[in-house]
Image (cartoon, coloured by chain):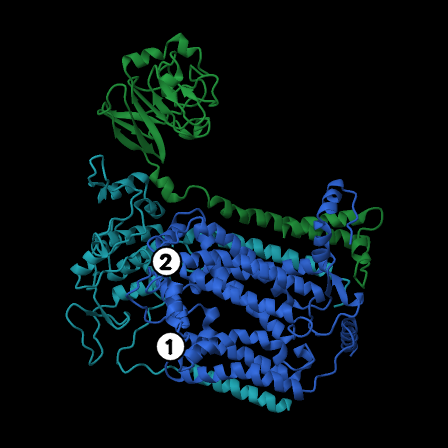
Amino acid sequence: MAVETNNKLVKWIEYRLPVFSFYRHFLVEYPAPKNLSYWWNFGSLAGFMLVVQIVTGIVLAMHYSPSATLAFSSVQGIMRDVNYGWLLRYIHATGASMFFMVVYIHLFRGLYYGSYKRPREILWFMGVIILLLMMATAFFGYTLPWGQMSFWGATVITSLFSAIPVVGHAITSWLWGGYAIGAPTLNRFYALHYLLPFVIVAAVALHLWALHQHGSNNPLGIDVKGPQDTLPFHPYYTVKDLFGITIFLIFFCYWIFFDPGALLNPDNSIMANALNTPPHIEPEWYFLPFYAILRSVPNKLIGVMLLGLSVCVLFLLPWLDTSPVRSGKFRPIFKQFFWIFVIDCVILGYIGHLPPIGPAKFYGRIAAIYYFLFFFVILPFVGWFERPKPMPESISQAVLDKKAKRAGTEKA
Amino acid sequence: MLPLWLAGKVFRAQARGPSKRIDLLSSTVSGTPPAHPEGEIKRRDFLFLAAGALTVVGAATAAWPFIDQMNPDKQTIALGVPIDVDVSGIEAGQQIIVAWRDRPVFILHRTPENLKTLKEPQVVNDLRDPDSKQMQQPPYAANWHRSINPDYLVVVGICTHLGCIPHLTKAGAAELGASWQGGYFCPCHGSKYDLSARVFEGVPAPLNLPVPPYHFVDPKTVRIGANPKGSNWSFNAIEQI
Amino acid sequence: MERVMRKFLVAAVVLLTLGVVRPVPAAAAAFVQKSPPDLSWSFDGPFGTYNQAALQRGFQVYKEVCASCHSMDYLHYGDLSALGYSKAEIKAIASGYTVTAGPNKEGKMYKRPARPSDAFVAPFPNEEAAAATFNGVAPPDLSLMAAARDGGPNYIYAILTGFNQKPPKGMFVPTGRYYNPYFPGGRIAMPPPLTANRVHYADGTKATLDQEARDVATFLMWASHPHLDQRHQLGVKVMIFLFILAIVFFFAKRRAWKDVEH
């Protein structure tokens, strides 16, 4: 696809490195289904948050000291002395929460509309890999301020590896570089926290490459039949994505400017102390559902395995879901189990936040059982006996039907 | 955001060509070629222009904290306060080097012989700026000895070429030849200064060494970083460190 | 089938919500930590700012009362300019303290009066020395107290005014500990630090216990969040800009999509 232009410089570059046609192909002409809803904004929002986190992170690294004696006070230097340091740190710290929120919505959208089904399985895998990398990056990053919650969070999570039989102890001391979390651990976590975002960038490139192979899924879940079903990405989806980013920024900036403390744990304003665990430790909200699953199992090894499985089960999703229909819109029974699953995840998150005693423990177990039931029992079986609703022939047909229906109601 | 918007502009302008401007959109994959009356296009153009302009303004403003964070922070500035140095222990002909704002400051106790060289035509004729016309010193040091008290030279010891520290080199030093009357010699690229830190012709350094603001609190103590009473000269006014 | 599903869904949600919302029974102890009162502060809300007079009074309380036991390591005397003090006043405040500097040319450490660029001088040379003085419990650093406790300034106020109440029946309060219902566990090692007229305010404000506690809580809030004023001011501007941008993009989006059936 050549770029038609009379600009000599553009022609000169294009002949040697076809960046302009690449760019035009992917961001201007790229045909996207015309019926994408606002749920499809969260992919570009996630990309936006990745850039925000990388840029603020690099800037913060210019002022941060990854040493156990200086880390906490260098963060205080950023918050108090560096020009706009408070702003940059609040963007980065609350940005982690925003990034996860956006990615979780993106993930649930894919789950509801069957975006993991043929031929988008590898696209989905890349997404799960990005999620795993994000979790690792967030975990390493949370250690860096070297507050009490940094220290004890890192202790608990690295201790998960001690559940591995025989080599568990060797692995934890290898991770720590000492007898416990300490100065060497902080240094290596800093190095990895700086590295992993760029690995995420590479994974995102593969994710987008796979996306452009077959194009976006859409709310109807039916394939694009021809040009009448699509719109060029620019200006239709560029302006829509930018509008979405603006609305998202209003939400994001509320936390940054007016309530940054709501997303930060007070215990992390106390410097790490290896001799004193805070009375109530909990991970950041985006890990709470998984944390609740871990805690609901009374066996260390099985708990850790289920924790790992709770994320990795997403890799199996294309085969666990046996229904040939993509969109939940046409799947009356799946739809209801899906919403129970969403509520279940929220409940797991809430239970992960409660102290592990009393009824919370009991309901945590029920919620954890449903979590796995949904993937391993409900998805395969519902796909077999559910009778999907009739589907429109094509995207443009659905649009016409909708229009006709609207005209009908207006008449009546 | 910004490059996207600009590229959109470029492509649309290109597509406009002789035919209608919406050609690009309709000639591609769009199945429903939108037909706009002229007025509609203007309104759309205005909205797109406004959105683009506001995005550019927002992005440019948001860039400022990312730039400003690299400037010296509050504590660094707070530490850049004047320092007091006791000069009574410096023997004639010797210098001490003290740190002020992380930079070396030379305090040279000049002998009467040293001072005599400053007026020798053999030296003065070879200097770039013998009369200290360039703003490399506060007005109260813009004199033949570039100091307040001729006995003590106070200069920031950073070569105006590329930032190395020149060495105090005595008269008759072998490597500088017989005509060398004493002064500063920079080992990095060979720049030479006389005993009032005025730069010689024919070396890469362009300017005399800068004199910081200073004054004598008492005959024994120099306060570096603060002007004498009555002067409000700013060190930022100099040509170059 | 669908009807069955819906019933199942409703039942599940009701069951789970009931179970989770039900309060967790308290542990056997009779003591229940009280949550601090929700006071109104000048720095509340998106337009909130610090009151400089309250900050100065709060600093006076800190300086005359708290500072004899509690350090504030992350503050520098120069930071006090945010409280409205002039450069000369800050210099005078700083020079009232002595810091150890050096080494000098002879390799010896020496004492000199503090400067505005110095950190607040701590009452003890190190944490161990502080702990040794107070039966093994070092008074915590106050630089981040309002950020490091749930409730922030409300919690600080509650602790400072929460002394001299009767402990619940059966609760044993050993000597060297004081009953305070707002403190986790109810037994705090800090004796009641504030009473009415503990300080004489320079600005003539009546020094009631309530006033002192509020002022010092305001000061500690500022110490934890020194850029709150700037943050709020910038935030309001950013929000106004983003709302305008959102409106423009909303119409631009609508205009772009005007003729597309979707």
Please, which residue is most extreme toward the left here?
C175
Q: Nearer the viewer, residue A149 or C40?
A: A149
Q: Nearer the viewer, residue A292 or A190?
A: A190
Quadrant location, the C terminus of chain B: top left
Cα separation between marks 2 and 1 = 31 Å
Residue B96: % across, % down: 29, 27
In the rendered picture, chain B carries what hue? green
Residue type at mark 1: give it: Pro
Residue in view at x 40 percent, y 61 percent: A143
Q: Which residue is mark 2?
A: A184
Mark 1 secondary-structure assignment: loop
Residue B10: % across, % down: 73, 47
- Output the letter for the chain in cyan: C
Question: Mark 1 Cα within 10 Å, few/some/many (few <14, many 20+)?
Answer: few
Splitting the image into 4 quarters, where does residue A152 fall? bottom left
Q: Which residue is mark 1?
A: A355
Do badges 2 and 1 share one subunit?
Answer: yes
Splitting the image into 4 quarters, where does residue C258 fall? bottom right
Q: What's the chain of the residue with tag 1?
A: A
Residue type at mark 2: give it: Pro
In front of the other: label 2 or label 1? 2
Image: A6 above or below B186: below
Residue A277: % across, % down: 31, 68
Q: Of the numbered discs in the image, which one, if any, rests on residue A210?
A: none
